[in-house]
Amino acid sequence: MNAKTFLALFARDVHVARRNAITTLIQTLLQPLMFVFVFGQVLTRSGMMAASYKGMLLPGIIAIAMTMTGVQAVAMPVIAEFQFTREIEDRLLAPIRTEWIAVEKILAGMVQALVSGAVVALPARFLLGSDLGISTDHLGLVLLIALMVAVFSAAGGLTLGCSVGQTQIGLMFSIVLAPMLMFGCTYYPWSALASFPILQKLVLLNPMVYASEGLRGTLAPQYPHMSTAAVIAVLAVIDIGLVVTGLWRFQSKSVT
């Protein structure tokens, strides 16, 4: 690998992300923060939900922000570069192997996902208040799971970006991302689906479930959550699978 070329490509993507930071933050953080206000303030203050619900909500909101940012940060530029601007042709001419171009895109998406998760946590905590019962006793596990969520979102974005046509972008959000978020245990624990046993088993195919449950189990362990060890194991399998698939799809699309 040509390290200078790799770093130059990464620096360019970071520069573009920084230049579009305000627009990106509005696009990715507005929806989670609206959910925070409605579920964490309106419904709890009106007495329709218990005040303790706010602490369970915050990890799910962080998972949403990270996933949406990572997917969009990789998928949308990949779709544009392959199908609109054709900018990918310039990147493919760089003195670097094709798979490293894909790895660079995953890395850039991971950084943006991690930043998004950290950024959304601040206004969300302000909206929800200070009595959330958020724990920092397992900070190492929090960082590990956050890193694994960033990998899954960025690698998933690469896979989607290399698999979806320019006329199917809206379909990607309607059929893939929207159900993934709604049935990703972001607003409720996985155990809450016990009354729907078939659905409870089906959602285990959704990577978002492990992102939400992993962050909830480490940031707010007093609420019901999956085993952290199981979450880490499944996220590792998901990350490897999506990275391999994303690299394969990128390689295939680059030679066509």
Image (cartoon, rainbow, N blue to C red):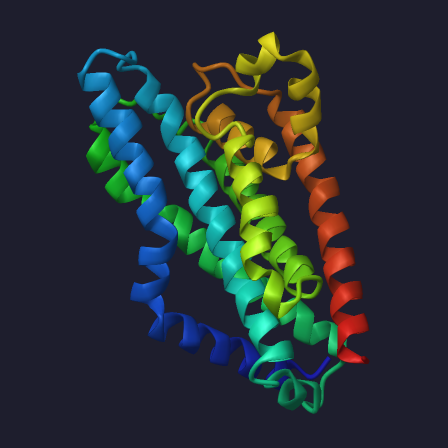
Give the total number of marks visible in the rendering: 0
Q: Is residue 149 visible?
A: yes
Q: Is residue 110 visible?
A: no
Spot occupied by residue 119 in the image (x, y as percentages of width and height): 33, 50
Question: Furthest-front residue in view?
Answer: 167
Spot occupied by residue 28 in the image (x, y as percentages of width and height): 39, 53
* Residue located at (59% from left, 8% from top): 195
Q: Is residue 40 left or right of residue 91?
A: left
Q: Is residue 109 left or right of residue 37?
A: right
Spot occupied by residue 165 in the image (x, y as percentages of width and height): 66, 66
* Residue located at (34% from left, 23% from top): 55
In the figure, 92 relative to 124: above or below? Answer: below
- The one nearer the camera, 229 or 157, is 157
Spot occupied by residue 50 in the image (x, y as percentages of width and height): 29, 11
Q: Name the quarter where the C terminus is drawn.
A: bottom right
* Residue located at (67% from left, 90% from top): 94
* Residue located at (81% from left, 80% from top): 255
Q: Name the quarter where the N terminus is drawn.
A: bottom right
- The one nearer the camera, 15 or 208, is 208
In the figure, 72 relative to 83: above or below? Answer: above
In the figure, 91 relative to 247: above or below? Answer: below
